[in-house]
Image (cartoon, grey):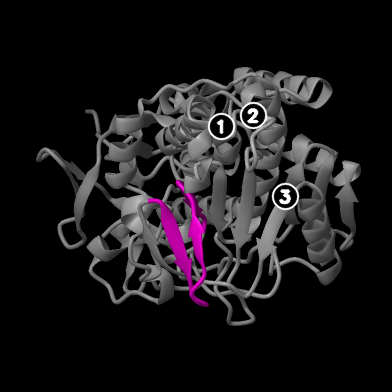
Amino acid sequence: MSTTTQRHHVVIVGAGHGGIEAAKALGNKAGTDVTIIDQNNYHTFQALLYQVATAGLEAGAIAHQVRGIVRRYPNVRFRLGRVASFDLDERHVALEGGDVIPYDSLIVAAGTVYGDLGVPGVREHAFVLKSLRESVTLRSHILHQFERAARHPDRIHDGRLTFVIAGAGPTGVEMAGALSELFAVAAKDYPELAAVEGGRPNVIVLEALDAVLAMYSEKTRRYTADVLRRRGVELRLSTRVSSVEAGHIELDDGTRIATQTLIWTAGVRAHPLAEALGVELMRAYRVPVTEQGHLVDRPEVFVIGDMSGMHAPNGEPYPMVAQVAMQQAKHAAKLLQARLAGADATAPFRYQDRGMMAIIGRGAGIAELSPRLGGMRFTGFIGWLAWLFIHLIYLPGHQNRISAFFSWVFNFFTFDRAARLQLDKPEDTARIRRTSGSMPR
């Protein structure tokens, strides 16, 4: 006489840091099958998208095929598709095209997108950095501006060599520093601009608050601002964008800046799939969950990472960073396994903060360890090395780590950028920006 044991099916939506970590944590677990769904067949290391956009790394160095990541786990399968809706009562996920995938437990980890903060023209005219395609598109656009300026140096006053970044958080600061390094390379690539008045490219960072990197210590903020200014970056603090048009932006004080390139790093909100869950959402469209990480009255549905509205013990929502997503993923997997084993599955999630870090360019980094790790702070070359070391550890795939490492070594010693390829035509760049999935209507 034979018996059949039904295996518990876990569906994971999103192959970002949280989704991949959840799949790994559930990999090879007895009695469990896992299906991870994503609209791309690769995992993107989003913290390095700006380096692709500024020709510091090739696109392939920061992306790794999902099937290649999970193939070591026989119980984990990948499904390429875009999620259209959830049916929480019937327990299934519907994909665009009509396919339906049933689940016993669901982990939603779709991450964030950029919002326009109600500023007219942002969606139509700004560039964002949430996907590999968008970073390659931005790189092509930046290089095209130099080609246009070299071809018609008498017309450069239309803002084609003025690059504006809205937002002075980590992404905005890192983007500004990387652009300043790219400009040094461009000066050698385009000697015809050297003798032209106004032929020097410039980058302007706009920030609504009165400091860069508001979440860092005052000393780190001062250091960052000093480094950026020494590298030719113009900082305009306590300044907001009021509207965006083709060819210029307008600030809240009425100032108009001529530019062909606005890079929007402000206004992050949870992915639109949060609205498909059918619950009342919190600020920034984050999903309210219990202290365990699942929906209220639905212990089989976890929402983790940037979509999750889980609060820390101090009442503040957890930050939208990769470490939170990865730790929540492991916690959700642990609770699911405990529930299947008939054990207690009510342990609350507690984030173990390890600190924050960023780089401002070649040899200039910042790192602040959490109090539980000593609270030490590093700036300059040591901070830069710490940033490189940590990012090499978390990059998925040995080939990606080797590629990134040698690119960084090449850039450091040659003061050059090897990935200066313009892959999109100007008309394609505009089309991709208008239809970007990283800024929903």
The answer to whether marks 3 and 2 mark residues whose Cβ atoms lie closer than 8 Å is no
- Disc 2 from disc 1: Cα separation: 6 Å
| Disc 2: which residue | 56
- Drawn side of residue 219 relative to residue 182, left or right: right
Q: Considering the numbered disc 1 on the image, is that residue within a helix, a strand or a loop? A: helix
Do residues under tags 1 and 3 come within 8 Å of each other at their CB atoms? no
Along the line of sight, which residue is nearer the eye, 277 or 269? 269
Which residue is label 3 attached to? 358
Image point 34% across, 43% down: which residue? 433
Establish if 120 lies above or below 15.
below
Residue at image location 38% in from the left, 68% down from the top: 119
Classify 10 Å Cα crowding around label 3: few (below 14), some (14-19), many (20 and above).
many
Where residue 158 appears, as percent x and y from the top left, is 47, 47
30 drawn magenta: no
- Residue depicted at 29% across the width and 46% down the height: 434
Could you tell me if residue 436 is visible in this image? no
